[in-house]
Image (spheres, rainbow, N blue to C red):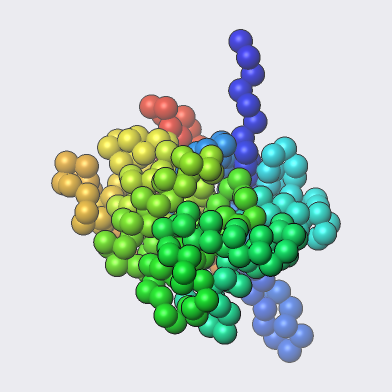
Amino acid sequence: MSAQPAPLLEVSGLKTWFPVRGGVLQRARGWVRAVDGVDLGIATGETLALVGESGCGKTTVGRSILRLIQPSGGTVRFEGTDLMTLPPDEMRAYRQRIQIIFQDPTSALDPRQQVRDAIAEGLDAFALTKNRRERTGRVAELMEMVRLDPDLMSRYPHEFSGGQKQRICIARALAVEPRLLICDESVSALDVSIQAQILNLLRDLKTRLGLAYLFITHDLGVVGNIADRIAVMYLGRIVETGTVSQILDDPQHPYTKALLASVPSLDLDRRGAQAAPTGEAPDPASPPSGCHFHPRCPHAFDRCASEGPAMREIRGGFSRCFL
């Protein structure tokens, strides 16, 4: 039997803690455990959706992978290389292969730059074109790839709609020919009809270019249109993983069931009788003992408050729950 190929991206024990400072000397009095031991993997050509409530740490995961935020511990292996050990100059080369698309395309674009220059930022940074003519041709090709008229490349960002701006950001990310795109809430700021168009575009680009995606979102209602697998995150930890059908049709963790219950676009048969999450998520600077979800869980019992459950394989997926 042949060995399984290594994942394109493999994250193990990732931690990103931020100090809580106080006093005259501003010493660290505690830690915000934004990411607290995350494991995940993404294969070539695969889309993994990282889902959870706002503030659960999922955006910090994406930025920590790229070391836009410096992690506190763990390993991030991309194409077999541990990115956490690379000096800055070597890490820069890997940022050509991993690109990120942010939530708000308006703030991601310089209002003083023509679209041609915004898209060509990566081309210039990595010297991927030989002259201005080749640069312009590549920008035109990228605009067509994201279904924008190349004749608009001399315009400025304010002359485009929100959906068009996000297409510009996607074109800019694709300019350096990455293998992995981190999409950080990349459709959440758009109207529903525009969301569908961008999701369709991302799906088509994945097939055409062989891309892999880490698709970060708080909305389980959109992941069925793009993801292959889902990882559900709560208070800095992954609590459940599985295929799209496993998570949407047969969730095992109470938090996943609660998230599904809060999605109006999913039918009642999928959501079941589980109630949406109640109360506010705890402060990551002082997470609950045991299972972090137990103060909000309708099925919690004594053990949940004193002992943190490990990930357990169940029905082809994994769930961090004693039940």
Of the pair 133 and 36, the residue shown nearer to us: 133
Q: Residue furthest bottom?
A: 24
Percent across and percent down for residue 239 are: 46, 45
Of the pair 232 and 156, the residue shown nearer to us: 156
Percent across and percent down for residue 4 are: 61, 23
Percent across and percent down for residue 261 are: 24, 52
Q: How many marks?
A: 0
Residue 190 in which image quadrant: bottom left
In the image, is 178 to the left or to the right of 198? right
Percent across and percent down for residue 187 are: 39, 62
In the image, is 131 to the left or to the right of 179? right
Q: At x 75% / y 54%, what residue is drawn?
A: 93
Q: Residue furthest top?
A: 1
Q: At x 58% / y 80%, what residue is drawn?
A: 113
Vertical placement of 26 versus 226: above or below?
A: below
Q: Residue furthest front?
A: 133
Q: At x 50% / y 80%, what residue is drawn?
A: 156
Quadrant of the rendering where the C terminus is positioned:
top left
Quadrant of the rendering where the N terminus is positioned:
top right
Is residue 166 visible in the rendered image? The answer is no
Of the pair 32 and 189, the residue shown nearer to us: 189
Vertical placement of 276 versus 241: above or below?
A: below
In the image, is 254 to the left or to the right of 51? left
Q: At x 53% / y 40%, what residue is drawn?
A: 210
Residue 82 in which image quadrant: top right
Is residue 154 visible in the rendered image? The answer is yes
Q: Residue furthest left?
A: 268
